[in-house]
Image (spheres, coloured by chain):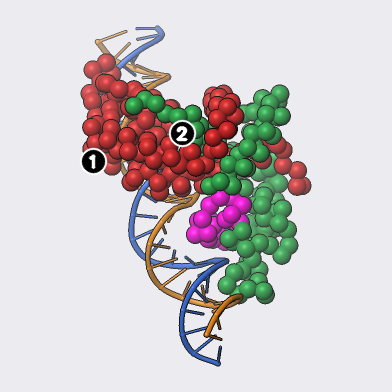
Chain colours: A red, B green, C orange, D blue
Amino acid sequence: METLSTSVRFFMEMAKVQAKVSRRFDNGLGGLGFTEFIMLSHLSEAGSPGIRRIDLAEKVGLTASGITRLLLPMEKIGLVKKEINKDDARSSLVMIAPGGKRKLEEGLERAELLADEIIPSGKKGKIRELSSFLTETGKRI
Amino acid sequence: METLSTSVRFFMEMAKVQAKVSRRFDNGLGGLGFTEFIMLSHLSEAGSPGIRRIDLAEKVGLTASGITRLLLPMEKIGLVKKEINKDDARSSLVMIAPGGKRKLEEGLERAELLADEIIPSGKKGKIRELSSFLTETGKRI
DNA sequence: GATATATACTTGAGTAGTCAAATACTAATC
DNA sequence: GATTAGTATTTGACTACTCAAGTATATATC
């Protein structure tokens, strides 16, 4: 009965570490939640004229509904803004706003510090390897 | 500005994969949430007379408060039960109940199937390596 | 060009957590 | 044996999501 496979144990371990990481980042990014930080990063990378909510959802790993819910307060405080999508009236585009750029920049600095506290400097190669493994894994879910 | 370090990217990737994994497991464990499944696994391993909430919190990576909140409905439906702690009246012990054992057994089967769908069979060595890296990482948070 | 099907998004209702403060005890010190 | 400081848990108030269903638009087919 006590025979958890390596794979299941791995997912349990990841859940644990992720819980702790997100708590740490939620409290250390200067008023930006970890998920908000991630969303802003993707939006910043996307640039102008922004991206569709559903593509943002895909990048972040959340549902479209979750993205809607999260964007609402972010728009209200000027982190992001809506743009009309001429090509498809079903979807409006989301774009990072000036306030979001500022917050992201600040959050980014703090995120790097936090990450350095957690990951020993010698482990960068391992991290890279692990990242690409996770990317492959994500595709299978 | 678009210069995210490897480490920060890693944490973003893990957040994404974890979000997808927990959604998948939440919906595929036969009425057991992924976190509930994890909690029951640890409780099952702990055996009798149970463990303190704070130790369970530590194992799972959540706060004591979160554990209290999660245990309440689990106790109500007979997955776990409270035991008195003679040594320290501040804390009562939590123990897996017969209903929890049944649910865990069923969830475990499904969890193994899900994990096998996600992790290619050739990757077990990699998974093991990755798990222990995550364990080390968790200790630094 | 009407009808059916699929896609993008939002909304209602609910769950799963968080933090900070309160409670109830234990342990240490004087 | 009082007082102080520390630990385990719960609670109030809140945030961050989830799913299922609803709305609006686009695309395909006949």
Q: Is residue B76 left or right of residue C23?
A: right
Q: Position of residue A120 (x, y in %)?
A: 55, 38
- Front residue of B74/A128: it is A128
Q: Is residue B3 above or below residue C30?
A: above
Q: What is the distance, in whole Å, between disc 2 and disc 1 at their CAs?
A: 27 Å
Q: Position of residue D21 (x, y in %)?
A: 39, 37
Q: Is residue A7 left or right of residue C4?
A: right
- Front residue of B127/A81: it is B127
Mark number displayed over residue B109: none
Q: Residue at x 70, y 51 (%)?
A: B102
Of the 4 image quadrants, the one containing the N terminus of chain B is: top left
Q: Indicate the chain on which mark 1 is placed.
A: A
Q: Mark 1: which amino acid?
A: Lys
Identify the residue position indicated by label 1 in the image.
Answer: A76
Q: Residue at x 70, y 54 (%)?
A: B44
Q: Residue at x 57, y 55 (%)?
A: B57
Label 2: few (<14), some (14–19) or many (≥20) C-alpha neighbours in 10 Å: many
Q: Residue at x 37, y 28 (%)?
A: A42
Q: Is residue B10 above or below residue A9?
A: above
Q: Position of residue A43 (x, y in %)?
A: 33, 28
Label 1: few (<14), some (14–19) or many (≥20) C-alpha neighbours in 10 Å: few
Q: Mark 2: which amino acid?
A: Val
Magenta-highlighted residues? B56-77
Let me know if residue A61 appears in the view. no
Same chain for the residues under marks 2 and 1 in the image? no
Name the image quarter holding residue A9: top right
Q: Indicate the chain on which mark 2 is placed.
A: B
Mark number displayed over residue B8: 2
Name the image quarter holding residue B125: top right
Name the image quarter holding residue A65: top left
Q: Is residue B130 above or below residue C28?
A: above
